[in-house]
Amino acid sequence: LRALPFLRCPELHGRELLHELAGQRRGRVRQRVRMPSEDVPGRGAETMYDAILGFQSLSDFVSSRSIDILQSPHSLLDLGDTHRVRIVAVVGLFDKGKTYLINKLFGLNLPSGKLFTTKGLSFFWAEERRMLIVDSAGVQATVSYRGSGQDVQPIVDAQTTESIIFEVISRMAHYLLFVVNDLTWFEQKYIAMLQQKYVQTQASKELIVVHNMRTTSVVEEATSLFSHQIMQSYEGAMSHLGDLVYTARRDERTPAIHHVGICMENSEAGSKFNAPNLKYIMDSLEYRNTYGADVKLGERLAHEIHRILPTFVVSESLDGAKRSSEQMRAVYVDDEAGQREGAYVRKALLRLEVPHNVKASMRTQGVVSPLGEIIAHDVNFEPKTNVYEHREGREVRRTIEVECPGVPDENIVVTELPNGVKVEIQKDKSIDENRVEAIEPLRQNHGRWFREFNFESSHGKFQVEARGVCLERGLLRITLRRQSVGRTWPVQPAAASGDETPLTQCTADLLASDPDAPSTPSGSQSASCAAGAVGLPVAPSRPESLASWVFSGDA
């Protein structure tokens, strides 16, 4: 359809037509570039976002019941239309270089730096790549106390809003780029939290952690820093595709995490690492999911916020009776007025619809952990575990206890490892939240949890005892027995012909002197002798190495 005007021109044929169409596409990209900012003298022409969801405060959303969706007047992205896109989300803590990374990857000039803060969720449509890039302000952004009568409210509001944005992004995105500077335990917690979400939802997504070492200029320093923070902290392997590229993976069931480092621009380290590593990231985005998905951006945003809204907002009728938060809805509405706000135009709204005679208010307790993790609903199942030893003489038994109340035995699998066990537990929700009305916030731990208890060889060789796996009153107990090492066996003289002490008796004497040997029922030795066997007592049957115990019946 775009080519039709040119088809009417007989002087344009073949290659000339393609050049005209390419020029038209480049023109559309230039239309999204505005002149240098008046606020920052000397700054070059800036790229405008295609759309901005102005979600900066959950408290404001609940009180005003609407969120503005702004759009560039030159954008060709129709928020209400379906587009086949691959959603690329760039997340991380505040001021780590998220927008800078987007500019470097896609050749843009979006406003970035300490004088600019990304508001809410900002979207750039790379039409030629079929990619929708999502930028965000990040976690732990600065909080304003102006106009606030309560000291704690702005912190709670900011933390809750950031948690919602983070949750929405993780659900929508096909790719996640997590930007860090120096990798801290706080960022490691967020990375682990994202990975756990993918495991629980069985999403086939891979996370790319970009280490923006923006103050590192020396090659040796960059290599040493990357090795110390990444290679020594995670199991995995360096990539053969470039330096400062490391893939961390715990096991085959856990999604891989790709760590990629970039350094200070125009420095020795930056010249060596940045171009190939940025190309590695771009190739990963291009080739891992070439299909994408059909997305109506406006409706998708409304759907994701609607799904998570009951976690953070409670509804109450004006007569004092609590109502189910499921009655509230977040809906996408076009704004025909098109009011201009700065360089952008308000094209649509996300509206919070609340039933008549009902008041909506924000939850302020029991919703978000100090790390920003949602804890009122959909809590990750993280059971408490204890590991201890019991010694009697030369016998050592090591016990593993896992607290898993409400988990049926068929949802537990114990797999033997070379020197320990792997425990897998699936905990389902006990309450169907769609069929009940919550009087207080429901807190249901659920999901899939697993852990490997593989002991060091210096501790000895441990194997699960026969009947050593049991579940009683919500407590899973696994008992392993350490095999004795360094035992000495006295050499007995060979029995002469007609000697009254057969070889079986020698073996029985040795076993009787060994406390670690399994006990022999009365009469078993004579039965073995009668059968012509060597005379070793029959040990209790065990599964083969690396076998699994799956609970069923009285097992």
Image: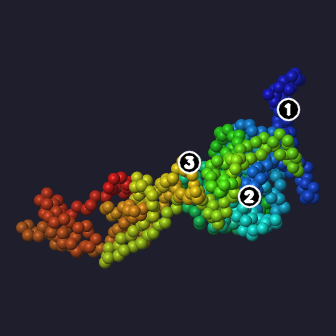
Relative to 462, residue 412 above or below: above
Question: Which percent across, then down, holds residue 547?
Answer: 38, 55
- Any mark on residue 59, and which? 2
- Image spot of residue 80 (x, y percent): 75, 39
Who's the residue at 49% across and 66% down the image?
A: 384
Q: Are marks 2 and 1 in contact (CB under 8 Å)?
A: no
Q: Nearer the viewer, residue 216 or 342?
A: 342
Provide the residue designation for mark 1. Answer: 20
Rendered image quadrant of residue 499: bottom left
Identity of the residue furthest to the left in this view: 498
Residue tagged by mark 3?
434
The three-letter amino acid code for the residue at tag 1 is Glu
Is any atom of residue 14 visible in this view?
A: yes
Residue displayed at 88% across by 47% down: 340
> Mark 1 or mark 3: which comes first in sequence?
1
Local crowd size for mark 3, using a 10 Å CA cut-off: few (<14), some (14–19), many (≥20): few
Mark 2 or mark 1, earlier in chain:
1
Q: Nearer the viewer, residue 217 or 177?
A: 177
Label 2: which secondary element: helix
Where, quadrant-wise, is the N terminus in this rendering? top right
Kind of residue indicated by mark 3: Asn
Whether the residues at callouts 2 and 3 have beta carbons within 8 Å, the answer is no
Q: Nearer the viewer, residue 67 or 275?
A: 67
Residue at 90% in and 56% down: 43
Q: Residue 475: x, y in percent? A: 41, 64
| Amino acid identity at mark 2 | Ser
